[in-house]
Image (spheres, rainbow, N blue to C red):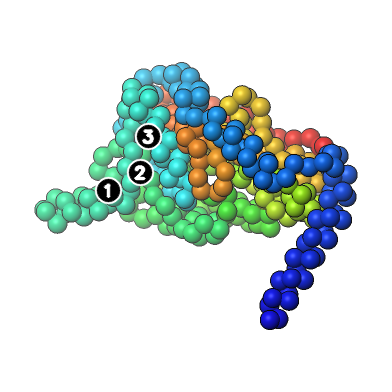
Amino acid sequence: MRNAIHRAAATATLTILVAGGLSAATRAWGVQDAQPSAKQTKETRKETQAKGNAADVDLAALDKIGETCWADLRGKRVYFAHGDLGGEIVKGVETVLQRKSEIGLQVFSYRGQEREAHRRERQGARDAEAFDRPGVFHETVGHDGEPEDKIDAFEEFLLSSHAAKVDVAILKLSCSDIGRSTDVNRVLDRYAQAVESIRKAHPKIEIVHCTAPLREPDHGAKAAVKKMVGVGPDAANANRGRYNDLLRKRFDGDTVLDIARAESRRLDGTEETVAVKGERWPALAPEYGMGSHELTEAGRVTLGRELLLSLAKCCAEAKDKKPTVTAAPTEGAQGTD
């Protein structure tokens, strides 16, 4: 009974906030008082989602990579550690490789290959291991929402004997790892410490850094109130933007898989952004997905393309040139409303 009373009181409070706070919120961001409902906005975004498909993603940048580079990469062993969204990116890579069969890279589940190596050992093969052959090996590490747990797992693996044959290593955090209250400086410092430790132990391993992925913008009356008080998905996107800018600056000159940049750049070339306290930050474009773990076909292929472009920066031919990020980074908050 007491819980029911508390829920009723909370609902009444939220109603008052929405009714009384919306006009203040809309004045604060300079938007019209007539807001589309969350349902209307969701339906519109679903329509936009449906328009984006894998065939619409431009893969021309991959055609500019020479065969010498791809041939070099076909001989490398790449370790890609990720959260749930990483599996979606791997699917995108596989789709791109089907469309661009001349690239010739192979993709494996690390755990699946490890089990196969153990089977071969039991049958008498000596020193069988997952990295016996070249390819892109991927696996899920850590727990979503715990970025330092993932960083610890990434570091531990690459400091182990299993990493002796690894040429390129990538750790991708999830959007749930960087929320609105996450201490982005602490997370980045921990990641930088891990990178330094890995490079000291295995100087030959090239580490590709990843920006944190984004969420779609929040909409509707409740979203306006959330923005006013600095909570909700948009505030989290702003914090991810801060983390991403810090990462780009910290590792300036290294190869960066700029997931956030690719996710916010729509198929028509415009950029999806959210306004938070008068500043604009990148957000997930609707044609690439809705939610934290699922991408559309266009989203998967877009990020798959970006991963392959990042790997192309690691071939011997590209190393003779100055390393660059795969997409031009944003320069902090993108203006004001």
Task: Tell me the mark number nearer the camera, choosing from 1 and 3.
Answer: 3
Q: Nearer the viewer, residue 46 or 105?
A: 46
| Residue shown at 58% from the left, 38% from the top | 46
Q: Distance between the residues labelled 1 and 3?
A: 17 Å
Dividing the picture into quadrants, the one containing residue 241 is top right
What's under tag 2, amino acid-wise?
A: Phe
Q: Position of residue 220 (x, y in %)?
A: 73, 47
The answer to the question of whether label 2 and label 1 lie on touching residues, with beta carbons closer than 8 A, is yes
| Residue shown at 75% from the left, 35% from the top | 334
For residue 271, which numbered disc appears in the image? none
Q: Can residue 248 be seen in this view?
A: no
Q: Nearer the viewer, residue 14 or 99?
A: 14
Q: SS class of the residue under badge 3?
A: helix
| Residue shown at 88% from the left, 50% from the top | 24
Residue indicated by mark 1: 113
Q: Which of 98 and 248 is in front in this view?
A: 98
Q: Distance between the residues labelled 2 and 1?
A: 8 Å
Give the mark nearer the N terminus: 2 vs 3.
3
Residue indicated by mark 3: 94
Q: SS class of the residue under badge 2?
A: strand
Q: Position of residue 326 (x, y in %)?
A: 54, 30
What's under tag 1, amino acid-wise?
A: Gln
What's under tag 3, amino acid-wise?
A: Glu
Instruction: Tell me if 292 is positioned left or right of 232 in this view.
Output: left
The answer to the question of whether label 2 and label 3 lie on touching residues, with beta carbons closer than 8 A, is no
Instruction: Tell me if 78 is positioned left or right of 174 in this view.
Output: left
Q: Nearer the viewer, residue 134 or 281?
A: 281
Task: Tell me the mark number nearer the camera, choosing from 2 and 3.
Answer: 3
| Residue shown at 79% from the left, 53% from the top | 225
